[in-house]
Amino acid sequence: MKLVSWIAALCAILGGAMHVDARDLNNVSEPRIAFINPGYGDRGFWKDVRDTMQAAADQFGFDLVVFDSDRDWKQMAESANRVFAMNPPPDYIIAVNEHQQGTRIVLEAQERNIPVLMLLNDLTDEQKQRFGRPGRELGFWIATLVPDNERAGFEIAQSLAIAAKDAHNGGLRKDLCLLSLAGDSMTPASLQRLRGLDMALEQYPLLREQRRLVVNWSFEEAYRRTAEWLATGGCLDAVWAANDSIALGAIKAIEEFGKVPGKDVFVGGLNWSTEGLENVASGKMTMTHGGHFLAGAWIMVLLKDYLEGIEKLTTNPEVSFGMQAITRDNFETYKQVLGDRDWNKIDFSQFSLVSNPEQRDYRFRIEELNSAQERDWPIPSR
């Protein structure tokens, strides 16, 4: 962004930013929404986010335009440029604070009077203190939706300790050598998962962290770093992985070294990926935490409620939801509900507060997904 643009945005913050009123935009028959996707559109976690968002957008009659960035921060910046060059401009922008690049998007959207919603990775506390918060100093930042990454990080580590004890019938006589494989060192989600890991290390002292390595969310890098650790004689009984790709890379290295995942080395991951679920079912992974790719749909639910004038989003624009662990115990339930990844069979309107006026909070949970599977409800024509 040009310096003049930054100054104008900051002046708006200091002088009292204009606040957007949903009623002013509710007359748009088909809101046009631009999603700046930090990941790949054809594979992996961000494809699932994209696909669930598209399914919900179709149901609500929203016109969704997606700009994929292939996990490249430079390409993400270019995606933002393309969004702000749209003519006519989008009615709403969905952005992610990947690599802490979200500030530029929020400020430029504020300057152009385009409502923006932050998804999955919020601005950090430091960024908010410097630039402002949704619905306050930054009136066109209308909502944020983030999962409880800290709890997820804790529960992944917890599952490793419990699995090891269970494997030894509670008679585990030694500490566990833990290798921690982080996603990155900047993204809020990564940092929050690591905070959860730190909490678990305090609560479960049998987990003895040997190394904490950043592997950039990469299967290949996780495989290489785990293989190097084993080749140099590093002690390894458990792997805490920030996502499923990382866990699967570590499993490949563990197996090539002649160890058995789920018996010699316990591995936990996150994402509810197809491959992760298969490894949970086979016992190679203790769990895959997640469900947060459904935030693509949930953010459409928030936007629908915002357009309907739900007061909760005006008074409390920062919404969080819990992720859930899939283990061998509940794997079949998950498979029955969403195993085919056919998001179009889910009636996402059932998660709206407009549809559930008796509810005070959003229930973005797997338990509600089964009852939301309807195949005969109408989809708005486009």
Image (cartoon, rainbow, N blue to C red):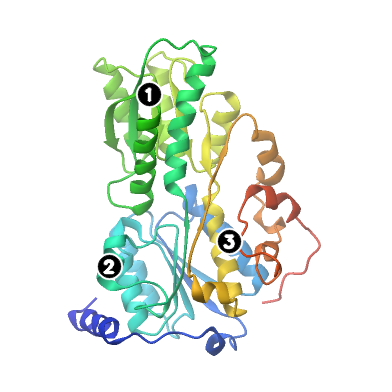
Q: Is residue 216 left or right of residue 293?
A: left
Mark 3 packing: few (<14 Cα in 10 Å), some, or many (20+)?
Answer: many
Residue corresponding to mark 1: 253
- Say which residue appears at 36% left-offset and 31% top-offset: 201
- On the image, the x and y values in percent for residue 294 come to 56, 55
User: Quick check: 245 above or below 60?
Assistant: above
Camera-near label (3 vs 2) is 2
Q: Residues within 10 Å of mark 1 (few under 14, many from 20)?
A: many
Amino acid identity at mark 1: Ala
Residue 193 x, y percent position in the rendering: 39, 44
Between the residue at mark 3 and the residue at mark 1, the CA separation in whole angstroms equals: 35 Å
Residue under label 2, please give it.
129
Residue occupying image coordinates x 39% and y 34%: 200
Check contact, mark 1 vs mark 2: CB within 8 A: no
Element class at badge 2: helix
**Tag 3: residue type?**
Ala
Label 3 and label 2: CA atoms lie apart by 29 Å
Q: Residue at x 35, y 25 (%)?
A: 178
Marker disc for residue 297 = 3
Question: Can the viewer see residue 128 in this picture?
Answer: yes
Q: Position of residue 340 (x, y in %)?
A: 67, 45
Q: Quadrant of the C terminus?
A: bottom right
Q: Alpha-carbon neighbours of circle 2 within 10 Å: few (<14), some, or many (≥20)?
A: few
